DNA sequence: TACATTTCTTAAGCTATCTTAATTTTTCTC
DNA sequence: GAGAAAAATTAAGATAGCTTAAGAAATGTA
């Protein structure tokens, strides 16, 4: 049930950076415990979180990993974590992979695509408040676990404004 | 090189609806000529375009198609088009698919995921103007071909504001 | 060719969200 | 457990992008 090839696990500390903008991604990461995130830094210096990767999730810059081009994102640990590595060299040639592995990859890609499409819909059509409420419903455990400012960055608003929204929601 | 199974082609007219919100998607569509779009209608009645599908592209509500749940999107033709159908029944069971088909699907999912991630980055970190310029660079032919209001809907702004932006860009 | 319909433009006023900045609270570290 | 650092709160002023509305241009259609 878990055919995607990974190396043995490694422990990393909160704040450790696994991939920087400009690097070429040689690895994807699978999270065993803890939590990683991927994010971009825009041209005004602000961070925008693309993905949280708690236990069980995979994270990489897919374009950089696949096409060996410079990454546009950073990946770091937002908690002390245990991770394993998915090596580019194991995925160079699809035709050498087992059918089961291909099926597993298909399902992971597909689910990821469904999730990213939902996020695009939310960014296009929902208000900040609606996106926050949706986040709390979709990721109830992350809401407990993550600092407000990271959640704000993920839903696309400033921490100040999220703080405001929380107060308004609470007192209603 | 084109293993994904489709039926023979069918002609449809501009405005024809292929999938409505609430329907369960029995088909995906492959565009031979013309152009389809997928979009949502939010709770204030506004349309937001998720995808343009010109020649060669596939469209569906992946979540609805995969999990046979009610669709959240609409799909219609924005030009007279020729399309072929991808039937749900042909994709019920991954294990019955050819390895080549699985590889082709993997590549399509992967490329789609790379593209949707770029869009999320743009929505989180770029201004309306920057997103418009990026759109014109990524889809130069679509910019010629599509009415302004559809482009505005795709990049997440009102047609009035895009009209404004175009004027500002032109006179600079 | 003209009428109807849709799309685009322009402009004024409005609002959701941001910025800045100061204060408080929480979390780390020795 | 005290002091430092980071995170969260609060509030006032600013702005990107929206709304409304009316006219102009383009497109479709008889």
Image (cartoon, coloured by chain):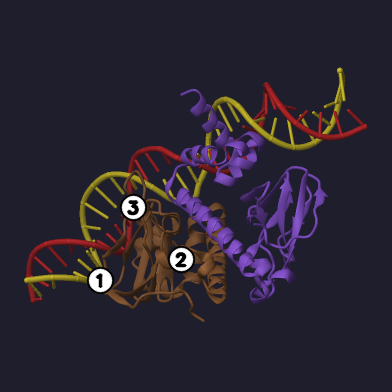
Chain colours: A purple, B brown, C red, D yellow
Check disc 1 and report the residue beneath it.
Answer: B13
Q: Are marks 2 and 3 in contact (CB under 8 Å)?
A: no
Do we see residue B127 in this rendering? no
Q: Are marks 2 and 3 on the same chain?
A: yes
x and y percentages locating residue A72 in the rendered image: 66, 62
Q: Residue B91, labelled with which disc?
A: 2
Do we see residue A10 in this rendering? yes
Alpha carbon distance from label 2 to label 3: 22 Å
Graded by Cα atoms within 10 Å as few (under 14), some (14 to 19) or many (20 or more), the crowding at tag 1 reads: some
Q: Indicate left or right for A137 with B166 as reference.
A: right
Q: Nearer the viewer, residue B101 or A113?
A: B101
Point out the image quarter for the N terminus of chain A.
Answer: bottom right
Q: Earlier in the sequence, mark 2 or mark 3?
A: 3
Alpha carbon distance from label 3 to label 1: 20 Å
Q: Earlier in the sequence, mark 3 or mark 1?
A: 1
x and y percentages locating residue A98 in the rendered image: 65, 70
């Amino acid at each position: 049930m878990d055919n995607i090839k990974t190396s043995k696990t490694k422990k990393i500390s909160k704040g450790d950076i696994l991939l920087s903008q400009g690097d070429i991604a040689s690895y994807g990461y699978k999270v065993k415990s803890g939590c990683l995130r991927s994010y971009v830094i825009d041209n005004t210096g602000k961070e925008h979180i693309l993905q949280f990767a708690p236990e069980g999730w995979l994270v990489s810059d897919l374009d950089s990993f696949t096409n060996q081009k410079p990454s546009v994102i950073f990946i770091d640990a937002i908690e002390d974590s245990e991770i394993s590595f998915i090596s580019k060299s194991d995925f160079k040639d699809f035709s050498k992979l087992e059918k089961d592995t291909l099926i597993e990859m298909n399902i992971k890609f597909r689910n990821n695509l469904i999730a990213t499409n939902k996020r695009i819909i939310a960014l296009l059509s929902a208000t900040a408040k609606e996106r926050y409420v949706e986040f709390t419903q979709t990721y109830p455990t992350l809401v407990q676990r993550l600092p407000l400012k990271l959640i704000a960055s993920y839903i696309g608003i400033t921490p100040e404004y999220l703080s405001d929204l929380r107060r308004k929601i609470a007192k209603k």
